[in-house]
Amino acid sequence: MTTQITSLEEYHKEYAKSIENPSAFWKKEAETFHWFKPFNEVLKWNFEEPNVKWFLNGKTNITYNALDRHIRDRGDKTAILWEPNHPEEKVVKLSYKELLTEVCKCANAFKNLGIKKGDRVVLYMPMVPELAIGVLACARIGAVHSVVFAGFSARALSDRVNDAQAKLIICSDFNQRGTKKIPVKKVVDDALELGCDSIENVLVLKNTGDSVSWNSSKNKWWHEEVDKQMPYCHAEEMDSEDLLFILYTSGSTGKPKGVVHTIGGYMVYTSYSFRNVFQYQEDDVYWCTADIGWITGHSYIIYGPLLSGATTIMFEGIPTHPTPSRFWQICEKHKVNQFYTAPTAIRALMACGHDLPNKSDLSSIRVLGTVGEPINEEAWHWYDKHIGRGKAPIVDTWWQTETGGILISPLPGITDNKPTYASYPLPGIQAVLVDPDGNELTENNVEGLLCIKHPWPSMIRTTYGDHERCKTVYFSTFKGMYFTGDGARKDDEGRIRVIGRVDDVINVSGHRMGTAEVENAINEHPNVIESAIVGYPHDIKGQGIYAFVITQGAAKDNTTRKEILEVVTREIAPIAKPDKIQFVDGLPKTRSGKIMRRILRKVASNEAHSLGDISTLLNPECVQEIIEGAF
Ligand code: WTA
């Protein structure tokens, strides 16, 4: 097991060591894992290309470390504790032994379907144990998994399948979310209709048992392919820098990018950060409410906890089904010790009143976590008082799909706990704030752009199929640094509070949305000429989406609004639907034709009184109309 810091003094000591000699620091942590062949160099890097390699020439398998390694000491311990959508359905507990067997059977089925080391497999699944099994089965045989959140549309799914050139899609017949059933297989069929030539097979899990249409040459049932397999599959020897997974995320341009993580570094860092940030103890029950379709589910439902031999809960449902007490009932039912969720969920449940959490026995909770967006003070205090009962430290964890693991976070009970501050970087993380020219702001009490100066093991290696994009987006803004895209503030003791994105990314309920991506979708409506979207403060979602739309030949009414929402749902996902749509005759542009989002953001945030200088606009006359028509 990686080390676990237990005191403030130790944190300072470990941090200092990690900066003085990063290679020695991470060598020691990496050596706590099983390597089929040891690495002979810890780190090689430059941020110009960028080219970052950790634990060079080491051979390992992440599932060997997450499963086989635990069999002797905790083979019968529950690895995955699955809580179903409907509370009256049966809980499933998979021990480490059972999980290993299931992963091996699934891995053998993949092989049988022609999946080989390096092939890409897309998982478009509900939050059921088979999703974790499928992910681990890919890693077992060295296939590259790419989980696509099951709320994405057929178009978004096919774009991702094609970008990854995946050979296999795994899905269910239907997903259950609260009282709704979602026809997942149908979405996959629609995605294939749009053209996914690389796909050879679709493996379908019988989840609800509702009938689905069937293509007998390409479609295979999970139970028919997996159940008959042998219960053991050799863990493929993988190079430390071989690909583990691709996860698509939104950026400033229209096309989602495939963030690539590699095996060795991701393994070491997710386990190290999990053990330290959640202070996991052997008999604890840990619950992260994220969906495995996002990075949080990858790193802190599957890999970090399993690599640490933890019991990790997987929840199929939603916070409000059958009642808004569901989260708290689950915490009581399974005596959860660490509870990790998103500010948007806290705010939504906060709006349901204090009496709901007060009805549940939450005394088992020792650590509370949040992730995905800045947490506001009110939500922080409510979480502290009504869920933690003032006794459970809150870890406000800052990180990104690209960082692979938590980089900035309090250590519970060890570093202090200042509301809304992600506070200090973890050992190994050289977080700095810079001004727009890239000068480091070394003093305290400053605001700046958040960058990381030195590589850490779980950092992004490339954007799949487009290394240049990785270089431009993250490593070209400031020389010699990874640029996060976030703005942050340091208080008078150097604690960091991440304020939010400074690029064209909107964070809606903790989900990243590229403005260009949503605009491209809106523009698919036949009567839309142009559109611009911006984020604005939203009580529950953190940020809402405000769309300014120019149309031609369409009534500027609710019917057109509804059609636009349908187009966005079809092109991306329901989560990308604008909250407000304002029809306008023009959009403020610079003389070079670029939309001045700054102005639109002010209007959307109800701050039109402080627009600043608009005289440099090409068409300043449109601004008044926009202000008058605002919601
Ligand atoms: C934001 C999620 C403030 C930030 C793990 C980042 C946060 C983006 C926090 C990454 C936090 C995440 N405080 N902001 N604790 N955590 N963010 O890739 O803007 O889905 O850049 O990864 O979420 O979102 P992603």
Image: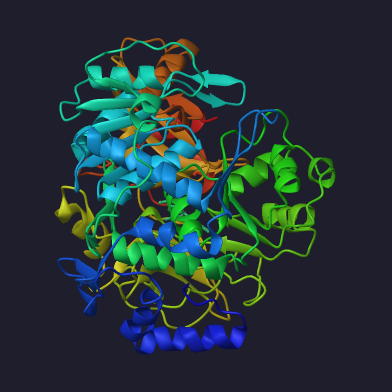
What residue is at 59 percent from the left and 72 percent from the top? 411
Residue 309 makes an appearance in the image:
yes
Left or right of 260 on screen, residue 576 = right
What residue is at 52 percent from the left and 61 percent from the top? 309
> Which picture quadrant has residue 35?
bottom left
Residue 599 makes an appearance in the image:
no
What residue is at 59 percent from the left and 88 percent from the top? 9
Left or right of 25 on screen, residue 144 = left
Find residue 105 and report its horizontal and vertical position in percent.
36, 40
What residue is at 47 percent from the left and 13 percent from the top? 557
Looking at the picture, tell me which residue is in the foreground, 447 or 98.
Answer: 98
Find residue 2 and report its horizontal and vertical position in percent.
46, 74
Find residue 472 and report its horizontal and vertical position in percent.
20, 57
Find residue 224 and report its horizontal and vertical position in percent.
36, 24
Quadrant where the image shows the C terminus: top right
How many numbered dots are placed on residues in this image?
0
Left or right of 500 on screen, residue 323 = right
Left or right of 408 on screen, residue 551 = left
Q: Is residue 371 above or below residue 220?
A: below
